[in-house]
Amino acid sequence: MHIEEYEEDIYTCNRTRCGFCRNECPVYQEKGFESYSCRGKMLIARGLLEGVLKPSKELLDCVNLCATCNYCGSRCALRNVEIIEALRADLVEAGFKDQYHERIIEGIKRNGNPYLKPRNEREIWAKDIPFSKSADTLLYAGCTYPYIFPDWLRTTAQTLTGIGLKLNCLGNDEYCCGNLMLTTGFLEDFTETGKKNIEAFRKAGVKRIVTGCPGCYKIFAEDYPKHFSNFDIEVEHITQLVAKLIDEGKIKPTKPVNSIVTYHDPCHLGRHMRVTEDPRKILSSIPGLELVEMEHNRFDAKCCGAGGGMMAAYPEVAVKIAEKRIKEAEATGAEMLVTICPICEFNFDRAIRYTDSKIKLVDLMELLKKAI
């Protein structure tokens, strides 16, 4: 079993039983049962290791009800999210698969994206943007931005190419990064997807990947090097690049945006990859903007609820988690909730509509465009 690699961590948790992982765990707060906390999932893992438990649909539901937000990881020295992903992989390989996850993954295998959209619509957003096929820096679009938020991609690409940066774009030849496959336990499919991507990057002469999606950023920067020994491409999140360009004076926000905003740290970008200050540096560079922090911010930021396959399989739980974060944003008195994650934006948009919230949801790069 995949969880055998983490046996020492699993028994350490079972013996210690501190329970710090339950504090602020978004799913445990909603469900209230031990089996939905990380500590509970460690007990499930031990049960499977010792043969006391057998793989089942019931276990799958417990293990899949997790946003892999890494809140537990920020309070523990163990490899919690990796263990949960390994648990999911063991259940999938035992024949227990969530029907919604399976449908999405079949869609990725057919069309290269999880939204069941035609592959030839992937590059519509890129029309008339001066990309260079000879550039070794790739603007990796991901799946959610081109199909759900294409205006964000146009804004970002126009901003970067407008200051003279040479960027490549794979267009319709781009393929899903495989994040959802890895995090929901479809490990074999993730491996095949990774091999496809690495070959496409090699053919295009890619030496650096820049992406706006925190999920894509995390999978390329952290997971590909673990799973593929031949992956040696530099990976950068768009906020890291833009913050440097602002420092160098190549991007100059000069037009005032007179508004009070609060910033939501996406889990993959903040807790997982520890990128918290670059987005704030960008916000602080915009004249007239006042940033007010939510009670939970940076590594302590509350999850939007949509990650880890939650939005696909348990949308009602995902949106309840998002509603709590919207309330926290409202409590700051901010007019705008700013973030830089398409999955967060997708789920926050639903929560704002469901609660009739007056707060305005804005993407960080779109806000920057107003200032330049």
Image (tube, rainbow, N blue to C red):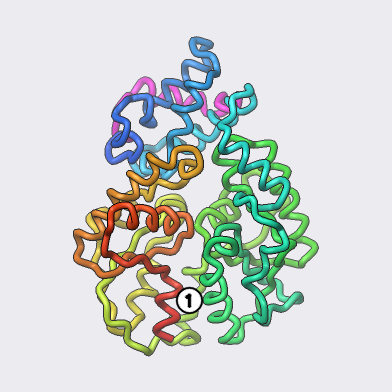
Depth check, front residue: 276 or 294: 294
Residue at position x 50%, y 13% in the image? 53
- Going by the picture, which residue comes out furthest to the bottom? 254
Secondary element at image label 1: helix
Instruction: Residue 126: give x, y in percent of width and height.
Output: 65, 74
Q: Residues within 10 Å of mark 1 (few under 14, many from 20)?
A: some
Is 364 placed above or below 98 here? Answer: below
200 drawn magenta: no
- Going by the picture, which residue comes out furthest to the right? 203
Is 285 placed above or below 75 here? Answer: below
Instruction: Residue 293: give x, y in percent of width and height.
Output: 25, 63
- Classify residue 215 as left or right of residue 304: right
Q: Amino acid at mark 1?
A: Lys
Instruction: Residue 254: give x, y in percent of width and height.
Output: 38, 89
Q: Which contiguous range is marked in magenta?
A: 1-21
Instruction: List the residue tagged with mark 1.
Output: 244
- Classify residue 12 as left or right of residue 120: left
Is 159 placed above or below 152 here? Answer: below
